[in-house]
Amino acid sequence: MHRILRGAPGDDGGGEGGAVDIDEGSGWGGSAGGGGLELLDLTWLPALTARQARELSPYEVGERGWPGSLDTLASAPALVCALRGVDAFTALRTLLPPHGGCDGDPGRLSVLMSPTPELALRQALLFFS
């Protein structure tokens, strides 16, 4: 599973970058009960390649948002995180905005999550091998 944080060009982190505040009550911390998420790997990319953007787009080929999402994903730096944990997909779905936080506007994609464990593995291989 991974997470993409995308900031607007020239964003110093104070804008709409897409970072999610993490606090102890959010389920991110490593508690004694086995909860939380473990960061496996992290990589910063100055820009996504066309192949990476196609792989990560939340839109299907032919959908209205497809071309715009590719442009958005390939036009700015990206932070790719590989995370794991018990029931990690459920935990992340409650924390992250649906559809990458774009509200139907592919130009506003900010945070993406792999929708299934199988797709997460394929995407992790694309970024971390």
Image (cartoon, helix red, strand yellow):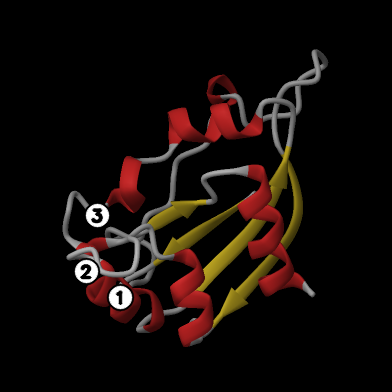
Q: What is the CA distance from the residue labelled 3 to the residue labelled 1?
A: 11 Å
Depth order, front residue of 15/122: 122
**Residue 79 at x, y percent in the picture:** 55, 67
Label 3 crowd (10 A; few <14 / some 14-19 / many >=20): some
Q: What is the secondary structure assignment of the residue under circle 2?
A: helix
**Residue 56 at x, y percent in the picture:** 47, 65
Residue of label 1: 72
Q: What is the secondary structure assignment of the residue under circle 1?
A: helix
Q: Is residue 93 left or right of residue 110?
A: right
Quarter of the image for residue 112 reads: bottom left
- Say the numbered circle drawn on residue 102: 3
Residue 8's place in the image compared with 86, above or below, is below
Residue 123's place in the image compared with 54, above or below, is above
Mark 3: amino acid: Cys
Q: How many marks?
A: 3
Q: What is the CA distance from the residue labelled 3 to the residue labelled 2?
A: 7 Å
Q: Is residue 47 visible?
A: no
Mark 2: amino acid: Gly
Precedes in sequence: disc 3 or disc 1: 1
Whether tag 3 and tag 2 are in contact, CB under 8 A, the answer is yes
In the orientation shown, which residue stands out farthest toward the top? Answer: 33
Residue of label 2: 107
Mark 1: amino acid: Thr
Depth order, front residue of 25/55: 55
Q: Is residue 105 left or right of residue 39?
A: left
Residue 95's place in the image compared with 52, above or below, is above
